[in-house]
Amino acid sequence: MSDPFRFSAGHDSRPPAEDCVYCESEVRLANLNPGLPPEMLALDITPLGAHYRLSHFDVPLLDAAGYRLSFEGEFETPLSMALDEIQAEPRVTMPVTMECAGNGRAEMSPRPRSMPWMHEAVGTMEWTGTPLAPLIARLRPANRVRDFAFEGADRGFDRGVLHAFGRSLTPDEVEGLGVILAYEANGQPLLLQHGAPLRLIVPGWYGMASVKWLVRITALTSRYQGLQQAQNYHFRQSEEEPGEPVTAIRVKSLMVPPGVPDWYTRSRWMEPGPVRIRGRAWSGDAPVERVEFGVDDDWTLATLDKAIGPHAWRGWHVDWEAVPGHHILACRATDSAGQRQPITPVWNLSGFANNAVQRIEVAVGEEENV
Ligand SMILES: Nc1nc2c(c(=O)[nH]1)N[C@H]1C(S)=C(S)[C@@H](COP(=O)(O)O)O[C@H]1N2
Ligand SMILES: [Mo]
């Protein structure tokens, strides 16, 4: 069998490594933070261990037995809670799609120095925990509280600053977004790398808001100034701009890569004939309303599968008659707020929130003819 990818690559399927220069720090980050295997996009719920991970620093090995979450600052009665006390609070379970704000940034050229995600930093697990808003209300924060800071047990440097990973939400955001303190994913205690024993889940927002290894909630009378809140995670076109904070997940869709891959290049090959193409679509702002599937820029409407929850992605499928040749497959989602994926990326300095349509090149051919 000859090489089906020779047309597209212009040479064999093991191009010289010198053609793709990555620096050592990016390879380290990529090894530290694995992505969702794209074939798992076929599943509504991402299995434990297959969900992507993004940790800035080292995983703190917190012991559930000795764990405490402290409430500090402008609460009427500051206190701390043990894990079993939090677990005794009202319990909710919901599927939530989480996506890293940096997902898709590796398409940027030249690429920013950060985690080089292609499109695999997304997943949906069923998170179990307790709603945060009623718990906070019971602790009676002062009327003048403007922000709640959420800090993890992990620490490290960024931009020369030593800090705990921390983010904040206003009282309205805590209430309106349906934030939970989560201690289980897919019916199991949180895995260490996903924030055990307790993390924040902020439905609808990019992943940075969902603080892992949560150990402290501080009620503040002014906005939290932590680096990850005030400096990082902003849309900027230049370093000097204050920028706009990254918040809700933009409408996006991905497909399960059809056919089989080439080991080294990940190029795809499939046989001609009828094939069901499947994928997922999501938006943090509004329900997904429509997904289009494109073959060589010829678009048709995909069928949406049953919705699994207001904060989770939605499956879609389309039947395609694959004809021999090289094709570019694409998918494009629109949400009920009228937001639609752009055809080409709209870049900001850090490559955040790239929701441009995904394209997958596939070689279709009879095995004997390719
Ligand atoms: N404490 C802490 N929380 C964190 C992070 C972190 O590095 N430390 N990374 C954030 C980012 S950027 C993302 S995308 C999500 C990823 O969650 P996961 O690793 O469980 O998929 O966690 C967020 N919460
Ligand atoms: Mo992220």
Image (tube, rainbow, N blue to C red):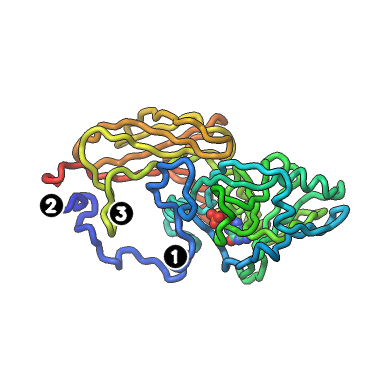
Q: Position of residue 156 (x, y in %)?
A: 62, 70
Residue type at the position of mark 1: Asn
Q: Earlier in the sequence, mark 1 or mark 3?
A: 1
Which of the labelled discs sits on residue 1, or is there none? 2
User: Mark 1 highlights which residue?
Assistant: 31
In the picture, measured across the screen, residue 266 lies left or right of residue 10, that is right
For marks 1 and 3, give the CA distance.
18 Å
- Secondary structure of the residue carrying tag 3 is loop
For marks 2 and 3, give the CA distance.
18 Å
Q: How many marks?
A: 3
Q: Which picture quadrant has residue 70?
A: bottom right
Residue type at the position of mark 2: Met
> Which residue is depicted at the point 30% across and 64% down?
19
Residue type at the position of mark 3: Arg
> Which residue is depicted at the point 50% across and 39% down?
313
Q: Is residue 319 above or below residue 170?
A: above
Mark 3 crowdedness (10 Å alpha carbons): few <14, some 14-19, many ≥20: few
User: Mark 3 highlights which residue?
Assistant: 266
